[in-house]
Amino acid sequence: MNMSQKWEVGETVKVGVLTLVARRHLEHAGEWLMSNKDGDKLYLFTAYQGCRAIFLDEAKRMIERDAALGKARREKAEMKGAAIAMMRQQIDDLMGVTR
C-alpha cells in the first residue's frame, strides 16, 4: 500500500497498474472495497495480499460480516465495562465506600 496516497472513502488510489476508487473500508477485516473509475467493477484490496475482482453479492456479504463483527465488538466492550463497574461497586461495598 503506497502510504503517500490518501486512503479514504471516495479517494482515487493506484493499486499496482489499476487506478481505483476507495468505496468502503471494512475496518474489522482491514480490507478495502474498491471500484474502477467507471464504477462498474468491484475489487477487494487486502494489504500484503493485493487486489482481486469480486462480485456484488460477495461485497454485500463482506459488508454484512463487517457490520456483525463491529456489533459483536461493541457488545463485548459494553459487557466488559458493565463487569468492571460491577466489580468496582462490589469492592466499594466491601470496603464501605460510598460514591
Image: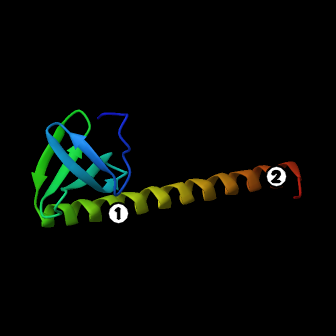
Tell me which amino acid carries mark 2.
Answer: Asp
Residue at position x 19%, y 57% from top?
Answer: 37
For discs 2 and 1, the disc positioned in front in the rendered view: 1
Image x and y of residue 82, in percent? 62, 59
| Residue 21 position by quadrant | bottom left
Q: In the image, what residue occupies the spot 21% across and 66% down?
A: 60
Task: Determine the secondary structure under disc 1.
Answer: helix
- Residue 4 position by quadrant: top left
Count residues near mark 2 (Cα–Cα under 10 Å), then give few for <14, some for 14-19, many for 20+.
Answer: few
How dense is the environment of label 1, judged by Cα within 10 Å: few (below 14), some, or many (20 and up)? few
Give yes or no for contact between labels 2 and 1 (Cβ–Cβ under 8 Å).
Answer: no
Residue 14 is marked as none
Q: Nearer the viewer, residue 14 or 96?
A: 14
**Which label sits on residue 68?**
1
Q: Secondary structure at mark 2?
A: helix
Residue type (three-letter) at the residue carrying disc 1? Ala
Q: Image height check: is 48 above or below 90?
A: above
Residue at 77% over, 49% down = 91
**In the displayed structure, would residue 86 be above or below residue 57?**
above
Quadrant containing the C terminus is bottom right
> Which of the labelled discs sits on residue 92, or is there none?
2
Judging depth in this view, the residue of 91 and 35 nearest the camera is 35
Mark 2 and mark 1 lie on one chain; the one further toward the N terminus is: 1
- The CA distance from mark 2 to mark 1 is 36 Å
In percent of width and height, residue 70 lies at 41, 58
Rendering coords of residue 96 (x, y %): 89, 53
Residue 65 is left or right of residue 18, and the answer is: right
Using the image as rendered, state which of residue 22 and residue 96 is in the foreground.
22
Q: Position of residue 38 (x, y in %)?
A: 16, 62
Q: Nearer the viewer, residue 23 or 89?
A: 23
From the image, which quarter does the N terminus lie in? Answer: top left
Side (left or right) of 50 relative to 23: left
